Amino acid sequence: MRLLALFAVTLVASPGLAGPLPRVVGIPGKPAQDQCTACHQALDEPRLQQPALQAAQDIHHRQGITCAGCHGGDPTAEDPDVAMDPKKGFVGKIPPQKVPEVCGSCHSDAAFMLRYAPNIPTDQWAQYKTSRHGLALVKGDGRVATCASCHGAHGVLPAGDARSPVYPSRIVETCARCHGDVALMKQYGIAGTEIEEYKQSVHYQALTVKNDLSAPTCNDCHGSHGATPPGVSSVSNVCGTCHLTQREAFDLSPHKDAFAAMEQPACEACHSNHKVLQPQDQWIGVGEGQVCGNCHVAGDLGAQVAQALFQALAGTVERMERVHQRVEQLERRGMLMDEATVKLEEAHQALVLARNEVHTVNPQRVTAKTDEAQAVLAKAEKDAEAAEKELRFRHNGLKVSLVVILLAVVALGLKIREMEARS
Amino acid sequence: MDTGNKISRKGFINWLLGTSLGATVVAALYPVFRYVLPPEVAEAPTNRVLAGKLSELPPNSGKIFRFGAKPGILVRTQGGEVRAFSGICTHLNCTVQYRADFQHIWCACHNGHYDLQGKNIQGPPPRPLETYKVDIVGDDIYVTRGA
Amino acid sequence: MKLIEKLWQALDERYELQPLVDFAKQKAVPRHRHDWMYYFGGLTLFFFLIQVATGILLLLYYRPTAEAAFESVQFIMTRVPFGWLIRSIHSWSANLMIASAFIHMFTVYFAGAYVKPRELTWWTGVALLLLALGFGFSGYLLPWNELAFFATRVGTDMVSKVPFIGHWLLRVLRGGEDVTGATLTRFFGIHVAVLPMISTFLILLHLAFIQRQGMHEPQEEPKLPPRPFFPNFVLREFMVWLVGLALLAALAAFFPWELGKKADPFAPAPAGIKPEWYFLFMFETLKLLPAKVLGIEGEILGLAAFSVGGLFWFLAPLWDRKRVRGEKSLFALVVGWGVVLYIAAFTALSYLGVFQ
């Protein structure tokens, strides 16, 4: 089949040559013209009709690759017996085990792909062979995902097309077609709940609510074509590709070596793997529902450190909230609180950095940042005090003028009385 | 009551009336007088501010300025072009800064990177920084938002 | 002194001012046990003048667009020297003007001063009170804060209940289907151009009628020698004005008017949205009415009742025949006290939170 395709390419590539017209692969950028779709569109049986209908939007068909590119046969013949003659290379339905090979026959050929999409990689087949899917397929498991399971067989769209099943925001649902099936996954020793867990994560939130397409979905951690669970040792590497500051902080912590020695995945221990929730300061501690308690018990050094970390954060958060409300109230009362608002932002920033430092589990590093926040908050409190003083000053000023006006009222009253007494 | 007392009483009432009325008039007119004089900042600094001086912004440097309480960032590229963006990181609202060594905008909180078009290029920021309009009058750099 | 006399002579020579001075000297105001009520019309005028003055000052910095209105008021309050005072005085004086106008109206009513020949004075007066309410309603929106925005949305929504032309009226008032920047621009125009023009004209007319006919004297009061208008009455009125000014200073000192939060048209309405106190009795009544009364929508019925009641009140000079003949009218008295008690009770109960 590959030979067939290459033969056609050579023909197209040298238009000056006389010979048979390009049959299997047309001119790049021009929709394929073939007899297959013409006949199949008219068939009643959906199984045979649908592929022909879907061909219109298929990226391959639109780029001039006929049905015969994969299925073999003669796409120009009007007689079905001629067109689908096994002697002409017709293979009919492609079994799952053959799919990677068929797709790879073009997609792994860099010289061929250059003519169509110069910037897409050509190593998918190689990657696939290393994936859990690929390894199982080689062993004869026909149920594992092949190219067509994710990309579709007919009507394949480019990965960047929002309608494609491998578009970032749709990958979860695509993987869920198998990985959400608990019964099926059990047979492979997989829980099958990963999808549901992932959907509760901040990552899924970012992807679907904020429409942040760079937010990680299944393939960003597991790989796409080489899909495999990241090994224990590489979890922090994988998370660290985006969460660099936290990883740097973590590398400074005694946890780094401890987790490595225990052969435990580091980030996952506190943040989970699929169900990565919005971290809370309240997680820090050894009590019920607190993450440090997974390894530490009350009274040990870890518990003491956790206590110190939590107090540093909670104290700052509480003070920040108090100052924030005070500033907001003053603003509502019509005071200019821009300076205090700026300081609140600075305190917020220091708090964010303090939360990064939590990964070092070094109370000194965390309090260095929370102290910074507290210092700025103290300045903001000074601003609020000044504004309150100004309000009091206005209040007193008006009271003074009130006395002056009342005095004028009394004087006028006396004047009237005196005047009327005279007349 | 004798006449002298009466006169002094009348005098006192007149004095009191004159003084208190005078003070009332001053108390009423002084605020008006101050109010009518244009304040130090002639306009609410919400949509347009004097963000900095061109002479104080060498190429490959940046500067934080403010729209009221909200930070913005002025950036002068290697080529000398001046650009302005919102200074608020789109990830967790930290204030971004210009990193001369990276030659682009960077957020210290979670290592977010933005290019010189304000586009998020690395790290957690989900969106680009909002772009503002820059006008240079002589040495003054004015930044307008929502334009 | 010589100079002033010369100036006066020159002016008198040209404009014949002496008769005016003679008239002022002659002019007198009746005196009796309840003559305190004569000061409230003047006090209302004082607050109106304060409104004109502070209103013009606010116009120096205010900007009537949805994008800039709140910011400009914030600017006035935070950056303009004494801007907070001017704005606080404008807001409080508005409330005091309406309160004073209400007191003025009820004293006039109970004194029976509205009967022939003073029908037109009564009618212009009631019209002025309605204009004052219009000032309050249109001005309330201008700072474009959360409270103002939603109160205006609720308030203008009432208009849509008017049969047949309700929706049309709503669109005219709001400048569109909803309260938007278009409404703000409209209300601004009404507040600073339309209403002041009509009010000034009506105030001049109202004063001209009083000047022409003199003060009304309640017949049941024992007669005292009248008080000279100048200087006795004028000085007393001036004293009342000073008390009004003191009241403004006190309110601005103890209850500084707040800036609030900028309106967000798409945010859900905050709980407990209430109109200004002078609309409360109507607001609470309409809320109390059941959704359907005899197959008619409760609110429509309520608005119809207020319209009919208001018209009845307005037409008092026509139906109150007894007082024209100089007799006491028990009916008018009952109606008057009924209205006062109803308004006072509903306003008070609303503040006590009984209707929640």
Image: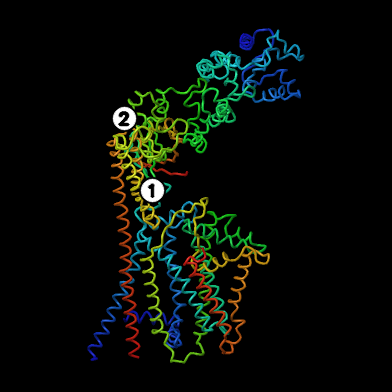
Label 1 sits on a secondary structure element that is: loop
Pick the front one: A42 or B144:
A42
Q: Dot 2: few (<14), some (14–19), or many (≥20) neighbours within 10 Å?
A: some
Rendered image quadrant of residue A370: top left
Query: Which quadrant does the N terminus of chain C fall into?
Result: bottom left
Asked whether, in this view, residue A155 is left or right of residue A273, the answer is right
Query: Residue B87, can we see it?
Result: no
Kind of residue sitting beneath label 2: Ser
Q: Amino acid at mark 1?
A: Gly
Q: CA distance from mark 1 to mark 2?
A: 40 Å
- SS label for mark 2: loop
Is C265 positioned to the left or the right of C72 in the image? right
Residue A377 left/right relative to A186: left
Task: Name the chain letter of the residue that bears numbered label 1.
Answer: B
- Residue C52's place in the image compared with C178, above or below, is below
Look at the picture and state if A344 lies above or below C174. above
Q: Position of residue C51 (x, y in %)?
A: 44, 68
Residue A219 locus on image (x, y percent)? 50, 26
Instruction: Give the chain letter at badge 2.
Output: A
Q: Which mark is residue A399?
A: none
The residue drawn where x is 72% and y is 23% is A49
Location of residue A150 by image quarter: top right
Taking depth in this image into account, of C292 and A273 the one nearest to the observer is: A273
How many labels, in total? 2
Near mark 1 (Cα within 10 A), the count class, few <14, some 14-19 or many ≥20, is some
Q: Horizontal and vertical percent for residue A319?
A: 33, 48
The residue wearing badge 1 is: B68
Q: Which residue is mark 2?
A: A253
Indicate how the structure is coloured in the image: rainbow
